[in-house]
Image (cartoon, coloured by chain):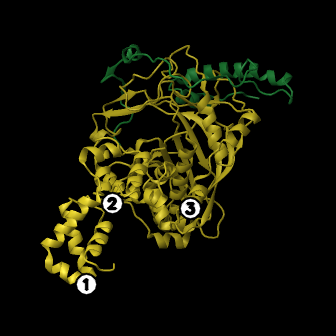
Chain colours: A yellow, B green
Amino acid sequence: MTVIDLESYEDALATYDPVMGLEVHVELGTKTKMFCGCSTELKQDANSQTCPVCLGLPGALPVVNEIGVESAIKIGLALNCEIAEWCRFARKNYFYPDMPKNFQTSQYDEPIAFNGYLDVQLEDGEIFRVQIERAHMEEDTGKSTHVGGATGRIHGASHSLLDYNRAGIPLIEIVTKPIEGAGARAPEVAKAYVAELRELIKALGVSEARMEMGQMRCDVNLSLRPHGTEKFGTRSETKNVNSLRSVERAARFEIQRHAAVLNSGGTIVQETRHFHEEDGSTTAGRIKDNAEDYRYFPEPDLVPVAPSRDWAEELRKGLPELPRLRRKRLKEEWGVNEHDMQSILNAGAVDLIVATTDAGAPSDQARKWWMGELARNANETGRSLDELPVTPAQVARVAELVASGDLNDKLARQVLEGVLAGEGDPDTVVEKRGLKVVSDEGALGTAVDEAIAANAAIADKIRGGKVAAAGALVGAVMKATRGQADAARVRELILEKLGVEG
Amino acid sequence: MPGITREEVAHLARLARLELKGEELEHFAGQLDDIIGAVARVSEVADQDVPPTSHPLPLTNVMRADEVRPSLTPEQALSGAPAQEQQRFKVPQILGED
């Protein structure tokens, strides 16, 4: 392993201006593949979702998936792109066993969407506009397993095994124009762009865009040029950077690496690089000279796609509110600050809180449960919030039971615990576990009387005006009722019975 | 106007993973040149107003509903594979050691 020299980030930025290009692949959430009717369901038996079309058997004819095209247009529109009136698919020819056809069906010089932009918000609130070059339709490749080498790497493997279930799943590739002028904030812009794009894709409902599942993957192209110069430097392309944090780290690492090479009088080699999650470094992959020749030509088995203007306008009308504007609106409606809103977004709780308020809960209650008890549980069990077995409607019901005085916070937590443990709806859990606030004034009065009798000295202090001492008696009553009393009501009763003003 | 050079044929052969000997390169360069020359005559009659054709039928927007259709079984899918292992297509080494 060679040691990679890095310039300090500050020194790198003092001399050079970074230019980035980001390529994001999104796997669409269609039921079937892009050109055949095979299911796209994940984690199925190897090679159980293939057919003559996606295996590239002779004579098989592809037909494009209508929802695949529709999704591509939606993405294009949401990215403020122009939509092609007429475009074709093309064959990208290459020899690699991840595609049994020996080509990938893609689009070449006629992408379905082009010339757009996406405004992204940086952490200090600044808006940065990222220009979009194009978004085009293509298909995913099969999954390789390399056997016989160290730790499953392709290098040194004796042979490889191919599962083609993924081959043919619709992909949309979204390519930015060169991102200039971000300076030291380039890594932050890269991360914010991918994050905003992911939110947008999810809002459009065209993919779940789970990066950890490979449903969204990013390639980071980066080059440096000395300040005051126009011409782009030679770029490196870091492939398959698969988390938001990694996108930021990869860009930062490459800035430092490029600067060290250039400062020592070296030249950057145009190559692909692999990103390593463990330490945030990149290592050299394939050298990418311009001789790479995919011999693109129009796919003769598919007819052109010519989206009518009516179709595009109809889809435009159905576009959801942009995630960034929606977050701004919700932030104001909920009365939270930028930092809290960011935490809610990072926790993946925005939609869950909205759904909970839609189910009738006040927003502060919805936020409190999702960002408190439930976030803690998700964190402890290594799940995301939307993977928890609790619905927004159930959380809203818990909030309702608290508001009506049937539950206090402590009991509500136990109810949620029961729901998460699969004991049923909140009302069922309340019933089964017997978790009701003791609201029977008679029973509560008896408990208060007993507590006063058992703690005569404290009661005297309270009578003498030391109201703060009431806490001890409240505690005694709560203990006697096993936490099922409304503490505020207990305190009222104690003071009432002792003839003291609260 | 020469349609294709010997070097271009060698490049194409490499891309297509075809191993061609020197005399074969010469031979195919000549043949391909004839073919390209014949096809090039089309542009003599096709004026600027004739768009290039990539499909013989004047069709657009042939699409399929997003409905799952039965796939092959893994056994059927693998039935033509020269080698298989763990219900997967087995392929020879892709890259050697670094």
For mark 1, what is the residue? A466
Viewer-side label of 2, 1: 1
Give the residue furthest to the left.
Answer: A454
For mark 2, what is the residue? A409
Q: Position of residue A493 (x, y in %)?
A: 29, 70
Q: Is residue A78 visible?
A: yes
| Tag 3 and tag 2, C-beta contact below 8 Å | no
Q: Is residue A255 visible?
A: no
**Disc 1: host chain:** A
Q: Please, what secondary structure does the residue beneath circle 1 have? A: loop
Residue at the (55%, 24%) spot, across then down? B22
A423 left or right of A317 in image: left
* Residue placed most toward the observer, A154 or A59: A59
Which of the 4 image quarters holds residue B28? Answer: top right
Position of the C terminus of chain A by quadrant: bottom left
Which disc is residue A333 wearing?
A: 3
**Disc 3: host chain:** A
Which of the 4 image quarters holds residue B76? Answer: top left
Q: CA distance from mark 2 to mark 1?
A: 27 Å
Label 2 vs 1, first from the N-terminus: 2
Q: For the residue carrying disc 2, how many other residues have a C-alpha within 10 Å: few (<14), some (14-19), or many (20+)?
A: some
Q: Position of residue A397 (x, y in %)?
A: 41, 49
How many marks are shown on the rendered structure?
Answer: 3
Q: CA distance from mark 3 to mark 2?
A: 24 Å
Q: Position of residue A304 (x, y in %)?
A: 70, 27
Identify which amino acid the numbered label 3 is placed on.
Answer: Glu
Q: Position of residue A424 (x, y in %)?
A: 32, 40
Image height of A89 relative to B28, above or below: below
Which of the 4 image quarters holds residue A471? Answer: bottom left
A210 left or right of B83 in image: right
